[in-house]
Amino acid sequence: MLVGVIAGTLVDTQMGVDFLIQNNIQAKGYPASKTPKEQSRLQLLGKDILFKKVMDLVNRAKDDGAKAIFVYCNSLSAAIDMKEIEIKMNIPIITPFTAYKKLGKEYSSLLILAANGQSCAKIETILEEVNENIQMWSISALPLVEEIEKDIPPEEIFENCNLKYILKWAKNLKVEAILLGCTHFPYLMDILGKEIDIPILNPGAIALKYLKDYY
């Protein structure tokens, strides 16, 4: 079964395709924009255009034989109503947000690292819905996404973006885990894991389990 991967840019779309292929799922990518800034601008200022574009991408994926859609992008998932598209297009759509209800029940305090404020707000809303007592701290970091898009080695990004201070803050806050609220950020999982003993959560891996229910 073919799965269509829709994401914000060429880079994270390919990340999503590679992620599914590594898990023995046939996948083909359909990017919604070319750069993180173009993506962010569409999500903030052009939601009607973005909604139509994603509808067109789902249509293309269906024409290519896709039986499910995997949206490998938090901020894109936050910007428009994917459930509405799922109903209109009559195809299962799995997004990273599928994972947050599960995480909200498992953790009582999280540091959220996302691409933009819109993603942070949506993630916080979902977590709050399932756990009204959860404590959350959020960081919006579009420049970090741009560094990853340039294919800079994770170790250099860690130093250039002073991520050690974010990890130090997380440790001082005594959060139970750091939630990667952007599908670009698993690129940094190894270096983050080496630098701190707090769990690093990748919602994409949890969303994959839901996708396999359809596969």
Image (cartoon, helix red, strand yellow):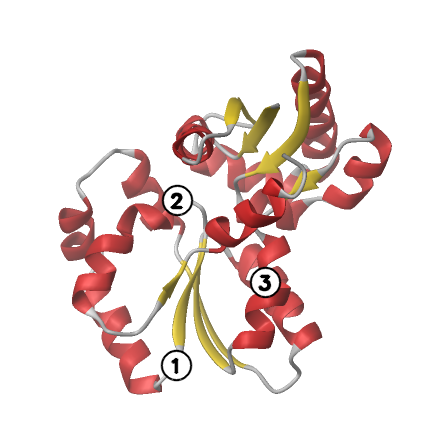
Q: Where is residue 40 in the image (x, y as percent from the top left)?
A: 52, 42
Which residue is tagged 2?
184
The percent coordinates of residue 146 (x first, y second) are 34, 41
Q: Mark 1 points at which residue?
A: 175
Residue 175 as seen in the image, left or right of residue 163: right
152 above or below 188? above
Helix, strand or loop at label 1? It is loop
Identify residue type, mark 1.
Val
Give residue 11's quadrant in the image: top left
Q: Residue at x 66, y 68 (%)?
A: 125
Mark 2, secondary structure of its residue: loop
Q: Mark 1: few, some, or many residues within 10 Å (few <14, many ≥20)?
A: some
Residues 150 and 208: in front is 208
Q: What residue type is labelled 2?
A: His
Q: What element carries label 3?
A: helix
**Does 189 appear above or below 136?**
above
Nearest the camera: 137 or 71?
A: 71
The disc label shown at residue 100, or none:
3
Q: Which residue is drawn at 28% across and 81% down?
A: 171
Q: Which of marks 1 and 2 is nearer the N terminus?
A: 1
Callout 3, which amino acid?
Answer: Tyr
Task: Tell me the quarter of the picture where residue 92 sits.
Answer: top right
Q: How far apart are marks 1 and 3 (CA)?
A: 16 Å
Q: How far is disc 1 from disc 2 in space, using C-alphas? A: 22 Å
Give the crowd class for mark 3: few <14, some 14-19, many >=20 residues within 10 Å.
many
Please state which of residues 72 and 105 is positioned toward the viewer in this rendering: 105
Q: Is residue 4 visible?
A: yes
- Pick the quarter of the image with the C terminus: top right
Question: What quarter of the picture does the N terminus occupy?
Answer: top right
Q: Within 10 Å of the Cα at label 2, are there few (<14), some (14-19), or many (20+) other Cα atoms?
A: many
